[in-house]
Image: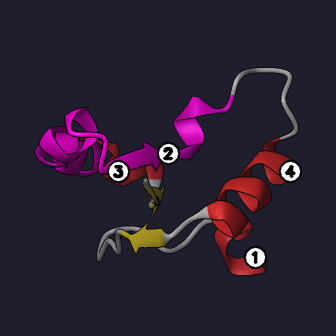
Amino acid sequence: MTTLVFSYSHADEAQRNELEKHLSPLKRMGKITTWHDRRIVPGQEFEHQIDHYFSQADIILLLISTDESPNDFGKNH
């Protein structure tokens, strides 16, 4: 199974949600699994989770917004 990780500005969350809906047939067929930072459970170490999933990803899908500059976390990793 292919793991796809979203990298995006939270200002673009609606677009990420819409894109994830379009990927749902592939998810149902067991072809891909997706992950994004909103799946981090409170109490989990944020940076560790981000690093883990980015290192395990087969595909990192960058959603680049013209309205927002990258967050500090993205600039540093």
The CA span between labels 2 and 1 is: 17 Å
Given residues 54 and 14, the one toward you in this image is: 54
Along the polypeptide, which appears first: circle 2 or circle 1? 2
Residue assigned mark 1: 77
Residue 17's x, y, as percent?
A: 26, 40
Along the polypeptide, which appears first: circle 1 or circle 3? 3
Q: Given contact means CB atoms under 8 Å apart, are the residues at marks 3 and 2 in contact?
A: no
Above or below for 52 versus 27: below
Residue 6's x, y, as percent?
A: 44, 58
Q: Which residues are magenta?
A: 15-40
Above or below for 20 versus 76: above
Q: Secondary structure at mark 4?
A: helix
Q: Amino acid at mark 1?
A: His
Q: Amino acid at mark 3?
A: Ile
- Mark 1 or 4: the one toward you: 4
Q: Going 67% across and 55% down the picture, which residue do you hit?
A: 53
Residue assigned mark 3: 32
Above or below for 58 versus 14: below
Q: Which mark is residue 35?
A: 2
Asked whether, in this view, residue 26 is left or right of residue 73, the answer is left
Along the polypeptide, which appears first: circle 1 or circle 4? 4
Residue assigned mark 4: 48
Q: Amino acid at mark 2?
A: Trp
Q: Amino acid at mark 4?
A: His
